[in-house]
Image: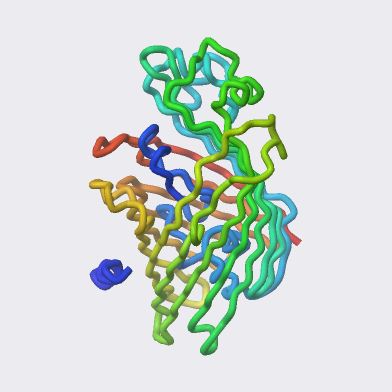
Amino acid sequence: MKWTFVFVTFLGLQTLTTAAYAQLGEKFDLFSGARSLGMGDAGIAVVNDETSLLVNPAGLGKLRNFYGTILDPELEMSSNAYGFNSANPISAPTNIEGVKTSLVEKPDAYYYAKGQIFPSFVARNFGIGIFAKQMLAARGNEDGTLSVKQQDDLALVMGVNFRFFDGRVKLGLTGKAISRIEVDEVALDSTLDLSNASLAAAGQLREGVGVGYDMGLNLTAPWQMLPTLSLVARDMGGTSFDANSGLRGPETSERPLALKQDIDVAVALFPIHNNFIRSSWTVEYRNLLTNQDDTSKTRYIHAGIEVNLADRFFLRAGYNQGYWTAGFESALENFQFQMATYGEEVGVGDAKLEDRRYLAKVGFRF
């Protein structure tokens, strides 16, 4: 299949913070899920479920029915996690104090762990949900200090979508109120107590609440394979966490890093092969507004394929920042199981360094 037209569209057109990039070399977004990560983390043109609220609100216009997600825990670890745990048992995978000894004993090895959950209710053109995430990315330095990015998010999100021209144009808007607890440091002293209370007292923990908005647009041509162009404007006007310190953590005068306004763009095709097999093909380019000074543009390229077998089994593969990805899903009426693996670019500057990760998700719906 020829993809030349895909890249031409890019010429016409996070949630990434400069400080986070400089420290650990990784992009940190509010949300990434098992389906898109199996497809190279390319999701804005193909999303059509409750995660549309966090990925692209225009995807709410693709829903064919209403449903609620009761429980959908998703757990993710880097391939280094077993080695870290073998060196020194990890008591709390997403807590700095719980992993600091292992990080010191394995300097320069990259550690990543994440857990998230998203109970929600969605219908065609509307959705609401509560998103909770705990994430820790860290590396031990040669001098015994730690480079750390830790996020604890709790967010209320609500989205709406408007359909025009028989659904060929979909315009969606998500509002989100995010309570964030964050640590973003390049040289934490590992000999000290690194609990949240101690970090707050030292001015190294940030906490606050921010309100932001995302807008998504899907343009679908009424042709075979339904070629689709999607754009998402994230954190329009910027999202600052400048309210309600102490809501979920210790009182602190420091606020989490603001989320800069950004734009993602994607194209997709949706071939129907027979009565039982369909597929989705997509290419996505991220962070159009904030990647101008980055010479390594491969960090922002994502591409994926999904093969749908009778709406029961899904096979996925993709390209994420220069590395391969793969995923699988088994779906029943009220239950789904997903798993995926992907490579994440964690090198600093032009340096290339892959962190291979594995994740699994179980979902229960009504």
User: Looking at the picture, how far across and down is residue 65, in whole percent?
Assistant: 68, 73
Instruction: State the image quarter where residue 333 is shown.
Output: bottom right
The chosen color scheme is rainbow
- The x, y position of residue 26, in whole percent, is 40, 39
Q: Quadrant of the N terminus?
A: bottom left
Asked if residue 38 shows in the view, the reply is no
Q: From the top left corner, tell me how far across and down residue 254 is, in percent.
A: 57, 34
Report whether 87 appears left or right of 319: right
Q: Residue at x 42, y 79 (%)?
A: 226
In this rendering, the answer to whether 16 lies above or below 221 is above
Residue depicted at 36% across the width and 50% down the height: 320
- The outermost residue toward the front is 253
- Nearer to us in this view, 270 or 41: 41
With 268 as the anchor, is 362 left or right in this view? right
Q: Is residue 11 above or below residue 325?
A: below
In the figure, 32 relative to 109: above or below? below
Q: Residue 250, image x and y in percent? A: 69, 29
* Residue displayed at 58% across by 28% down: 93
